Amino acid sequence: MNYGNYGGRGPGYDSYGRDSYGRYDNYGRRGYDMKYRGEDEIDRMHGEYGRYMESKNRYGNSEDTDRSYHYMVKALEDFIKVLHEEANTPQQKQMLNETLQRSMR
């Protein structure tokens, strides 16, 4: 599955502009006045979830579906790191930890 790749990426990037660690190049975001620090991670999660669902619906369980799932979870991890870094008090960090634990039930 290599749709969306119009030949504009250099070596080391996949068809979505991600490097080997799943990070995007942000050349198109220069000068962007970010409202929230974690906004890029939220956008990444949204995009990765869309690609995961498209791959799952189109191909079922495949290598591309697994790769999309991996990138989606990585985007979630990055967003959680931002939330943790933004937590200013032990109570806020505890709230985040409790929420993560509840989400896994």
Image (cartoon, grey):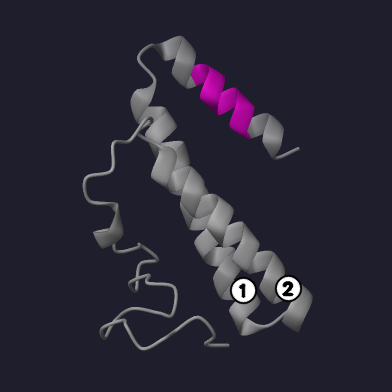
Residue in front for this viewpoint, 10 or 63: 10
Residue 40 in percent (x, y) is at 40, 46
The quadrant of the rendering that contains the C terminus is: top right
Instruction: For mark 2, give the secondary structure.
Output: helix
Residue 60 visible? The answer is: no
Circle count: 2
The quadrant of the rendering that contains the N terminus is: bottom right
Any magenta on residue 57? no
Residue annotated with mark 1 = 66
For residue 103, which quarter of the picture? top right
Which one is closest to the eye, mark 1 or mark 2?
Answer: 2
What's drawn in magenta, residue-wise? 94-100
Residue type beneath disc 1: Asp
In contact (CB < 8 Å): disc 1 and disc 2? no
Q: Residues within 10 Å of mark 1 (few under 14, many from 20)?
A: some
Residue in front for this viewpoint, 36 or 103: 36
Above or below, 3 against 43 in this view is below
Relative to 27, is 16 on the left or the right? right
Residue 49 in percent (x, y) is at 62, 58
Residue at figure coordinates x 54%, y 85% from the top left: 3
Q: Residues within 10 Å of mark 2 (few under 14, many from 20)?
A: some
Residue type beneath disc 2: Lys
Residue at figure coordinates x 51%, y 18% from the top left: 94
Between the C-alphas of marks 1 and 2, the distance is 9 Å
Residue at figure coordinates x 32%, y 83% from the top left: 8
- Mark linked to residue 5: none
Any magenta on residue 99? yes
Residue 90 in percent (x, y) is at 41, 13
Above or below, 58 against 99 in this view is below
Query: What secondary structure prevails in the magenta region?
Result: helix
Residue 45 in percent (x, y) is at 54, 51
Residue annotated with mark 2 = 56
